[in-house]
Image (tube, rainbow, N blue to C red):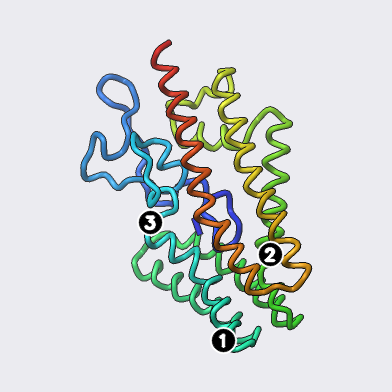
Amino acid sequence: MNGIPEGPESPDVPAPAGSEQPRPGATGRHSVGSETDPSATPRTGLGGVLQQEEFSVAGAIGGPRGIAESVLPTLLFIVVFVASRSVVAASVTAVAVVAVLLIVRLVQRQSPATVLGGLIGVALGAVMAIRSGDGTDFYAPGIAINAVSLLVLLVSVLARRPLIGLLVGVLDPRVEDWAKDPDARRVYTRATLLFAGLYAAKLAVQVPLLLTGHVAALGVAKLAMGLPAFAVIAYLVWLMHRALLGRREQR
């Protein structure tokens, strides 16, 4: 539960709450997290890694906790369904694990926002699957979110306000003027299209599996096209962002 959201298994593009914003350095340029303060807590998610000099896969996907919160609900749903062939048992297990993860965050006084969003998505999918008796319905909310995300990304490009540019401009003060820079606008338009391509690929693979009732295969496809695919796209966007910053420094 970390990117552009896609239910419980996709990372959020903005960094989680509680992370530290970069602070202006003595020279007036913005420094980045732990580069100036070793005790600073590094930001995670796409917004966090874009501010770092080195790309971190763990940082992009939210670290071990982000992986657990994103993967466990779907993974346990698949395992329990394959073992028992019971939609009810699989659905209840998935909801229960998200509820436990939410309680852990609350006990540790951490932001429950991402887990709470995942709980809503998992609970909705569970209710749909139990009511219909069809395990593929468990994935329907996530697939619907994929479709909405793709639409939003494409509309933002057509409106000449690419969504990744808007997000990065807020998260990284070094490019807050991106909309006035033709080079930056091109970079973040391409970055937005990369994410649009990811969501289009998810729909191309998952919708046929949904329509043909392949419960386990749909779950595996959802996991494979979740965090691993997001990490690849995040790395490509990080490379584009760093190249843009390098060109700006040479001006």
Q: Secondary structure at mark 1?
A: helix
Measure how far apart labels 2 and 3 are at the Cα level.
25 Å
Q: Describe residue 169's horizontal placement relative to residue 89 as left or right.
A: left
Q: What amino acid is labelled 2 in the image?
A: Pro
Q: What amino acid is labelled 1 in the image?
A: Ala
Against 33, residue 71 (above or below) is below
Give the residue displayed 69% in from the left and 58% down from the top.
205
Give the residue displayed 49% in from the left and 27% down from the top.
176
Q: Position of residue 168 (x, y in %)?
A: 51, 35
**Circle nearer the viewer, 1 or 3:** 1
Against 244, residue 226 (above or below) is below
Q: Secondary structure at mark 3?
A: helix
Looking at the picture, tell me which residue is in the foreground, 216 or 26.
216
Q: Earlier in the sequence, mark 1 or mark 3?
A: 3
**Circle nearer the viewer, 2 or 1:** 1
Q: Position of residue 2 (x, y in %)?
A: 49, 55
Say which mark, if any, is on residue 141: 2
Which quadrant holds residue 216? bottom right
Give the labeled residue for mark 3.
Answer: 63
Measure how far apart labels 2 and 1 are at the Cα level.
24 Å
Q: Describe residue 132's horizontal placement relative to residue 221 as left or right.
A: right
Give the labeled residue for mark 1.
Answer: 83
